[in-house]
Amino acid sequence: AFERVLIDDLIPFIDANFRTLTGRQHRAMAGLSMGGMQTRTITLANLDKFASMGIFSGGSIAPSDIQDMETFKKQVKVVFVSYGSKERGASSKANVEALKAAGVNAVYYESPDTAHEWQTWRRSLYQFAPLLFRD
């Protein structure tokens, strides 16, 4: 239900009522914990709506999750995955490395000495935000 509200209601409302650049290349989605998993699910299903994705302590994207790698590489500007160093992010780091090897602009960030907590996610956002909306 959240995906439908976001795609069908919230994004059109924001674009109609605020000064935004409406194209997919000007739209990113990020989330932390369960929101990171929702970000993964929603962005992969709606690549026509999002060009950048940030997953903070909420899973990752493996090359096997991508149906058409060549199209994905053309559409997605950045895939950002982050975890705290005290979390279990090893498989996510391996997924990011595999995406890089496939030619995707993928970034893995590990917040030093943090776990599944706000400090991890604040640092993650600090690392992710400068990667967005570059030409």
Image (cartoon, grey):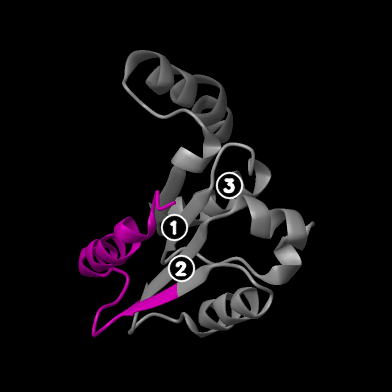
Tell how many labels: 3
Q: Which residue shows up at 74% across the image and 53% down it?
A: 71
Asked if 105 appears above or below 46 in the picture, the reply is below
Type of amino acid under label 3? Thr
Residue 4 vs 9, above or below: the answer is below
| Alpha-carbon span between mark 1 and mark 3 | 10 Å
Question: Quadrant where the N terminus lies?
Answer: top right
Write down the region rendered in magenta. 108-135
Q: Which residue is mark 3?
A: 43
Above or below 87: residue 11: above
Residue under circle 2? 81
- Compared across the picture, whether 37 is left or right of 98 comes to left
Q: Amino acid at mark 1?
A: Gly
Q: Secondary structure at mark 2?
A: strand
Tag 1, which secondary structure? strand
Residue 118, given in percent of the width and then of the height, sits at 23, 63
Tell me the residue at 50%/20% (across/down): 9
Residue that label 1 marks: 54
